[in-house]
Amino acid sequence: MDDEEERLQERLYELEIEHKDLDDVIARLIDNPPVDFIQVQRLKKRKLQLKDDIQRIKSMLLPDIIA
């Protein structure tokens, strides 16, 4: 594994942890009224951004194989 691939793997791991943590935070916020919908919306937007970043890194690590 080269340095670039290792760096991408580490970044992927960090993003996946942050994504999971956001899941937990959002669930707690929704389950404990009063719900701050603006904060929940911001967290969901960040979660979507993380998902996009995760997919981008995964595609860099596992390039499409043309069959």
Image (cartoon, helix red, strand yellow):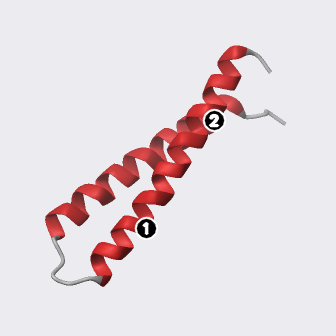
Secondary structure of the residue carrying numbered label 1: helix
* Label 1 with label 2: CB-CB less than 8 Å: no
Image quadrant for the N terminus?
top right
Q: Residue at x 66, y 33 (%)?
A: 9
Secondary structure of the residue carrying numbered label 2: helix
| Picture quadrant where residue 63 is located | top right
Count numbered badges in the picture: 2
Q: Residue at x 19, y 62 (%)?
A: 39
Q: Residue at x 45, y 58 (%)?
A: 21
**Mark 2 is on which residue type?**
Ser
- Left or right of residue 14: residue 35: left
Kindly report the distance in space between the C-alpha atoms of the residues bearing marks 1 and 2: 26 Å
- Left or right of residue 56: residue 63: right
Q: Residues within 10 Å of mark 2 (few under 14, many from 20)?
A: few
Q: Is residue 57 or residue 16 the one in the foreground?
A: 16
Tag 2 or tag 1, which sits nearer the N-term?
1
In the image, residue 8 lies at what x, y percent? 62, 28
> Dot 1 corresponds to which residue?
24
> Dot 2 corresponds to which residue?
59
In the image, residue 48 lies at what x, y percent? 39, 52
- Left or right of residue 36: residue 24: right
Q: Residue at x 38, y 45 (%)?
A: 49
Q: Residue furthest top?
A: 3
| Picture quadrant where residue 36 is located | bottom left
